[in-house]
Image (cartoon, rainbow, N blue to C red):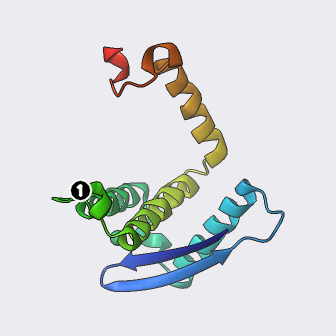
Amino acid sequence: MFITFIYYLGWDCYIVESENQPGDSEMEAIEKLIKKIKDFRDERDWAKFHNPKDLALGLNIEAAELLELYLWKKPEDADVERVKEELADVLVYSLLIAEKYSFNIEKIVTEKIEKNAKKYPVSKSKGTAKKYNEL
Ligand SMILES: [Mg+2]
């Protein structure tokens, strides 16, 4: 798997590339990715700006930039290259928040899937977009 992150802060744009080695598990790949993001951050002495509140603000700003790519367009008309970039920004902020709290990403995502499975049992939710409280 080859991943390219384009990282923005203010007016600056940085490209960080990562290539997994054969045999890396997905979690090892994510851990390597987090290390690359932290190295990138630490080389610039930006950790002092990365408190959970500002990381959450950054995450939401990047999510809004992702949304903007679809504004007034059919979904298929969005610029997929720009979608990659904004999604990468969202992932970077998500990983930084998880790192800030020392969350185990696999564990928290698995727990959330299990929680959602209870809220959205297949028997009631299959094929419908209704919210759990409307099933
Ligand atoms: Mg962005």
Report the residue at 25% width, 59% height from top.
70
Residue that numbered label 1 is attached to: 74
45 in relation to 105, above or below: below
Q: Nearer the viewer, residue 50 or 71?
A: 71
Q: Where does the C terminus fall, quadrant-wise?
A: top left
Seen in the picture, residue 83 relative to 11 is either above or below; the reply is above
Q: Position of residue 29 (x, y in %)?
A: 70, 63
Tell me where residue 100 appears, x and y as whole percent. Answer: 54, 56
Say left or right for 135 vs 67.
right
Residue 75 placement, left or right of 72: right
The residue that appears at 33% across and 16% down in the rendered structure is 133
Furthest toward the right, the residue is 23
- State the image quarter where residue 33 is shown: bottom right
Relative placement, left or right, of 75 versus 7 is left
Return the x and y of residue 59 as percentages of the image width and height. 37, 58
Q: Is residue 104 visible?
A: no
**Taking the image as four quarters, which one is ligand 1 found in?**
bottom left
| Viewer-side residue, 39 vs 66 | 66
Identify the residue at image location x=62%, y=65%. Answer: 34
At label 1, which amino acid type do we have? Answer: Lys
Q: How many other residues sit within 10 Å of disc 1, few (<14), some (14-19) or many (≥20)? A: few
